[in-house]
Image: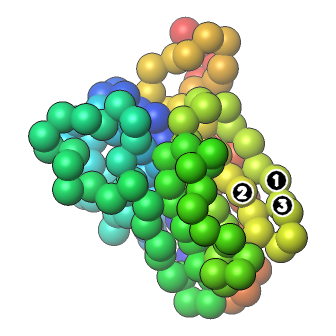
Amino acid sequence: MRVGLISDTHGLLRPEALDFLAGSDHIVHGGDIGGPDILERLAAIAPLTVVRGNNDTAPWARAIPETARVDFGSVVLYALHDLKALDIDPRAAGVRVVVSGHSHKPACSEREGVLYVNPGSAGRRRFTLPIAAAELIIEGDAVAVKLVTLREMP
């Protein structure tokens, strides 16, 4: 199973991001979406799980949850926008992958058997950080993460 990860689009869904997400079995958006049209375009590719970011304050975003849990067989994913707001003990909750956004910085680390993945920002550039996204490849209980730079400049 291929799960596409995207975050911090801020109203801009680049063609490179759409190309990268094509073929995903599921997509997770880590917040700071920027508009409902972004969600419509992503949902046209694959089933979509989305969380609200700190900039998603318009009326259209009120129904979007701040956190989401998705089970991919035995692999449990927990999504939220800002990792600093993590409100559970992932390991105790049986979570294997935590997906967040907010920092715009692509990152992946593993602590106590839990993968923490930030796909970076696929939308508007922030400082000198790359335009990025990520994918999870789930095979049974195994999870592999790939961070991808979609565009270096501008």
In the rendered image, the quadrant that contains the C terminus is top right
Distance CA(mark 3)–CA(mark 2)? 6 Å
In the rendered image, the quadrant that contains the N terminus is bottom right
Q: Nearer the viewer, residue 151 or 130?
A: 130
Decide which of tag 3 and tag 2 comes sooner along the chain. 3
> Does residue 21 lie above or below 14 as drawn?
below
Amino acid at circle 2: Tyr
Residue located beneath label 2 in the image: 116
Q: How is the image coloured?
A: rainbow
Residue at the spot x=22%, y=45% of the render? 61
Please say if the residues under marks 1 and 3 sit with CB atoms less than 8 Å apart: yes
Residue located beneath label 1 in the image: 109
Please say if the residues under marks 3 and 2 sit with CB atoms less than 8 Å apart: yes
Residue 125 place in picture, x, y as percent: 52, 17
Residue 128 place in picture, x, y as percent: 66, 12
Please say if the residues under marks 1 and 2 sit with CB atoms less than 8 Å apart: yes
* Disc 1 secondary structure class: strand
Q: On the image, which quarter does residue 147 sit in?
A: top right
Residue 105 place in picture, x, y as percent: 67, 31
Decide which of tag 1 and tag 2 comes sooner along the chain. 1
Residue 92 shows in this picture: yes
Residue located beneath label 3 in the image: 110
> Does residue 71 lie above or below 18 as drawn?
below
